[in-house]
Image (cartoon, rainbow, N blue to C red):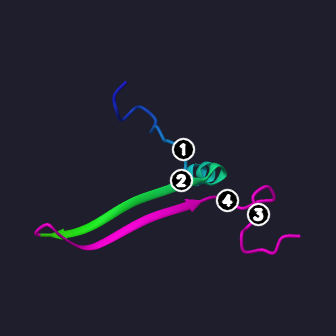
Amino acid sequence: MTGSDRPAERGPALVDLLDRLLAGGVVIAGDLTLRIADVDLVRIDLHALISSVNAAVPAPWEAGS
């Protein structure tokens, strides 16, 4: 069987990956520093939590009952 005879192997769809990530939640953390001649000019710290909202995990902006 040659390479052209085999069916294309496809990984999971992007929607499926996004669904899995949002179901469990994702934490993104990173630091970026712009430095010229050993002088820090700009520093950006990123900390984010991305998660889905449902009955078990309500949205923080809705009033609780």
Evaluate if marks 4 and 2 touch, with contact meaning CB atoms under 8 Å apart.
Answer: no
Spatial CA span between label 1 and label 4:
20 Å
Q: Secondary structure at mark 3?
A: loop
Q: Tag 4: residue type?
A: Ser
Residue 58, disc: 3
In the rendered structure, does residue 39 fall within the stretch colored magenta? Answer: yes
For label 2, the residue is: 14
For label 4, the residue is: 52
Mark 4 or mark 2: which comes first in sequence? 2
Spatial CA span between label 4 and label 2:
16 Å
Q: Nearer the viewer, mark 1 or mark 3?
A: 3
Q: Secondary structure at mark 2?
A: helix
Evaluate if marks 1 and 2 touch, with contact meaning CB atoms under 8 Å apart.
Answer: no
Which residues are drawn in magenta? 37-65
In this rendering, would 54 be left or right of 50? right
Mark 3 or mark 4: which comes first in sequence? 4
In the rendered structure, does residue 51 fall within the stretch colored magenta? Answer: yes
Q: Tag 2: residue type?
A: Leu
For label 1, the residue is: 12
Q: Tag 1: residue type?
A: Pro
Q: In the rendered image of this protein, does residue 5 appear above or below residue 39?
A: above
Q: In the rendered image of this protein, does residue 22 appear above or below residue 39?
A: above
Q: Nearer the viewer, mark 4 or mark 2?
A: 4
Position of the N terminus, as image quadrant, is top left
Quadrant in which residue 34 is drawn? bottom left
Mark 1 or mark 3: which comes first in sequence? 1
Q: Nearer the viewer, mark 2 or mark 3?
A: 3
